[in-house]
Image (cartoon, rainbow, N blue to C red):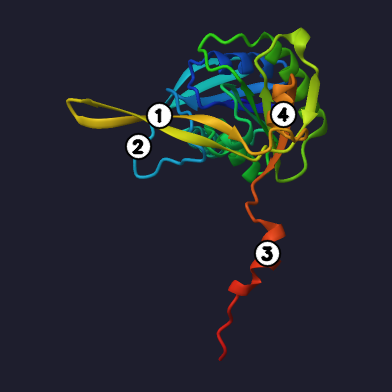
């Protein structure tokens, strides 16, 4: 167990414990405190807020040294956070960091992201949490620029915290450090994925592989994360758990009904 006067930082991801991105995030996090890592033993991308039930979840400790303990588990990113918060340490983590994801989680992708599922699980527990993603799916992606700015963002997160119930979705465009124009606080772009299904057949039968193209409904809106990234800015979107469409409550009052006794 980690017990120290330093902040305790929980690190996870959805690309798996062997991904280059999480190794980068671990090294950065160690600059700011003691680090507890719990990550999937393999890729768990696009699992959103999935929780494993009625199926055994296996775990093992793979490394321990001063200020660092690393576990892997067979579950999802959210399983990792739940397990860490409830079973692995007497001290509740002060911060939760997820990533650095191989691939963007901007715009509608946040709805599918296992990285952000883990971050939002932290948010549910009132722990300041942030997810970091680079718009590059390559396993050997270059995180040099991402690392420098991630340090700055984590420093501000630790120094200032976050409003209760709010977590961060941080996305980096695939550019060089000298091309970065800055960091923008944005809203999530209104968008969707236009699905494509690639069909084939093997000895087990007909199968499909899901693919698709990203479509932004508002490409010229300058306050969105997608616009920021396309114009060489790092985007930060504040995210909350409350799914209520507060603006629509009055407009759907016609559905209300009260039984008269």
Which type of secondary structure does the marked residue at label 3 adopt?
loop
For label 1, the SS is loop
**What is the residue that sits farthest to the bottom in this orientation?**
261
Dot 2: element: loop
Q: CA distance from mark 1 to mark 4?
A: 36 Å
Residue at figure coordinates x 64%, y 39% from the top left = 217
Evaluate if marks 1 and 2 touch, with contact meaning CB atoms under 8 Å apart: yes
Mark 1 or mark 2: name the one nearer the start of the chain.
Answer: 2
Residue sitting nearer the eye, 156 or 64: 156
Dot placed on the residue nearer the N-terminal end, 2 or 3: 2
Instruction: Give the number of the mark in front: 2 or 4.
Output: 4
Q: Along the line of sight, which residue is nearer the eye, 89 or 222? A: 222
Query: Which residue is under mark 3?
Result: 249
Distance (Cα) linking label 1 and label 2? 9 Å
Of mark 1 and mark 3, the one earlier in the sequence is: 1
Foreground tag (2 vs 3): 3
Place of residue 26 in the rendered image (x, y in percent of width and height, measured from the top left) = 62, 17
- Quadrant containing the N terminus in the rendered view: top right
Q: Which residue is mark 4?
A: 227
Residue labelled with disc 1: 74
Q: CA distance from mark 3 to mark 4?
A: 30 Å
Is residue 71 visible in this depiction of the protein? yes
- Residue drawn at the location 70% of the way across and 36% of the way down: 128
Q: Nearer the viewer, residue 259 or 180?
A: 180
Q: Is residue 223 left or right of residue 226?
A: right
Do the CB atoms of the residues marked 1 and 4 lie less than 8 Å apart? no
Q: Quadrant of the C terminus?
A: bottom right
**Residue 91 occupies which quadrant of the picture?**
top right
Crowding at mark 3 (Cα within 10 Å: few <14, some 14-19, many 20+) = few
- Look at mark 2 in the image and give the residue it sits on: 56
Please say if 145 is above or below 52: above
Q: Quadrant of residue 246?
A: bottom right
């Amino acid at each position: 167990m980690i017990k120290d006067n330093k902040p305790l930082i929980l690190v996870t991801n959805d690309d798996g414990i062997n991904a280059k991105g999480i190794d980068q995030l671990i090294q950065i996090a160690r600059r700011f405190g003691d680090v507890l890592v719990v990550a999937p033993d393999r890729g768990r991308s696009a699992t959103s807020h999935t929780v494993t039930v009625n199926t055994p979840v296996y775990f093992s400790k793979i490394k321990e040294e001063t200020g660092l303990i690393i576990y892997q588990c067979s579950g999802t990113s959210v399983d990792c956070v739940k397990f860490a918060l409830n079973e692995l340490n007497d001290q509740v983590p002060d911060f939760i960091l997820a990533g650095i994801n191989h691939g963007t989680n901007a715009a509608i992708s946040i709805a599918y992201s296992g990285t952000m599922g883990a971050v939002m699980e932290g948010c549910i527990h009132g722990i300041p949490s942030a997810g970091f993603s680079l718009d590059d799916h390559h396993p050997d992606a270059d995180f040099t620029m991402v690392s420098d700015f991630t340090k700055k963002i984590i420093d501000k997160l630790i120094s200032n915290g976050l409003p209760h119930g709010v977590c961060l979705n941080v996305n980096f465009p695939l550019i060089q450090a000298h091309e970065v124009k800055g960091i923008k606080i944005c809203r999530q772009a209104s968008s969707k994925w236009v699905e494509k299904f690639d069909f084939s057949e093997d000895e087990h039968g007909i199968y499909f592989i899901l693919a698709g193209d990203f479509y932004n409904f508002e490409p010229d809106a300058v306050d969105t994360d997608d616009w920021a990234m396309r114009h060489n800015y790092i985007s930060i979107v504040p995210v909350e758990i409350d799914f209520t469409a507060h603006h629509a409550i009055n407009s759907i009052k016609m559905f209300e009904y009260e039984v008269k006794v």
